[in-house]
Image (tube, rainbow, N blue to C red):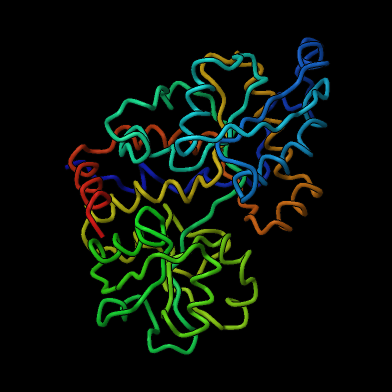
Amino acid sequence: MEDLTRRRFGSSGLAWTGWISAGSAIGLPHGAWAADFFAGKVLHFYVGIPPGGAYDLVPRVIAANISKYIPGNPKVVVENMPGAGSLTMMNYLYNQAARDGTSIGFPMNTVLLEPSLKLLSGTSGNARFDLQHMAWLGTPGQDPAVAWVGGNSSFKSFNDLRDRSATFGSTGAGADSTVIANLANRLLGTKIKVVSGYKGVAEYLLAFEGEEIEGAVTTYAALMAARPDWIKTGRIKLLAQFGTERSQDLPDVPTGLELATDPEARDMLRVYGVKFSAAYPVVMPPDVPAPQVQILRDAFAMTMLDPAYKAQIAAVRISGSAVTPEAVERFVRDLDGAPQSTINRLRNILDAKQ
């Protein structure tokens, strides 16, 4: 079996510290043709979910800030195109949208796993796009799923979840709150009992306060949005995070990969963890001319460093740890090249009845 080591899903180049290309719109000019091209144009931001929630807020914050970094300062319009977990939008972007740099998609992160795991389309063939042929701008934030328990509980470390049972709340079978708990049980030897059926994160957080459950797996952004003081005050403690590497926001919390002892288990967690490391992927159709791609990549990078943008994105509790387009491209390549045995075993676990 091929080993998906850190060489394949490595940490280098994942997050921005200030990268801008040599032909940056702020540094060296792209040329008069660039301003002529984008002047008077409308950029369409297609969002793969209905209005509301983080996947809708992120493109709106970007839309409010990016135009000033694009020569010609085009207008930016955000359009929601929900359906099938963003497959409707992705199919439109790949097969019908303009391929000149004026069409940009904001899908749910599960789309990144679609070619290998087919979690959204199954065997129906409803995913009519090839991620490797699309152009990526990056992702404005990482959002690891975190396993947490009460700060005063008897579970002091992740290893304690391997020794005795803990009751975790969840919204349903397909939610990451259930999926990650089940992956931890199957791949990391934990004894988590999942109680599902809560209507949302807020409801199982109330269940925790009422001592109905002992913890949960929640994305870091959702946890910070709902209870921003819980980690800081010690009301809860984080036992593990799930992504391809430690988040910049959680440098002291071990990853599931670090806690895995079996190489194939580590590979499966790394495959699934891509959706957390590239939490809000931003993508364009195939065949967009390279100059337009570079202009938009530069504008996106400058937006990630813009003080107004950073303040606005922090206000909606989204991590500002942006990821480069090269890193997202590497994720897509490596997922496509993952050993079929690893993909099959992971899919079997994900398809298993709760």
Kindly identify the residue that appears in the image at 20 percent across and 37 percent down.
340
Percent position of residue 351, x then y: 25, 49
Instruction: Please indicate whether residue 119 sits to the left or right of residue 301 in the image.
Output: left
Percent position of residue 217, x then y: 43, 66
Instruction: Please indicate whether residue 147 sits to the left or right of residue 163 in the image.
Output: right
Q: Quadrant of the N terminus?
A: top left
Instruction: Please indicate whether residue 96 sits to the left or right of residue 131 in the image.
Output: right
Percent position of residue 27, x then y: 78, 29
14 w.r.t. 262: above or below: above
Depth check, front residue: 92 or 246: 92
Q: Quadrant of residue 163?
A: bottom left
108 w.r.t. 53: above or below: above
72 w.r.t. 32: above or below: below
Kindly identify the residue that appears in the image at 43 percent across and 76 percent down.
215
Q: Quadrant of the C terminus?
A: bottom left
Q: Quadrant of residue 186?
A: bottom left
Q: Quadrant of residue 48?
A: top right
169 w.r.t. 332: above or below: below
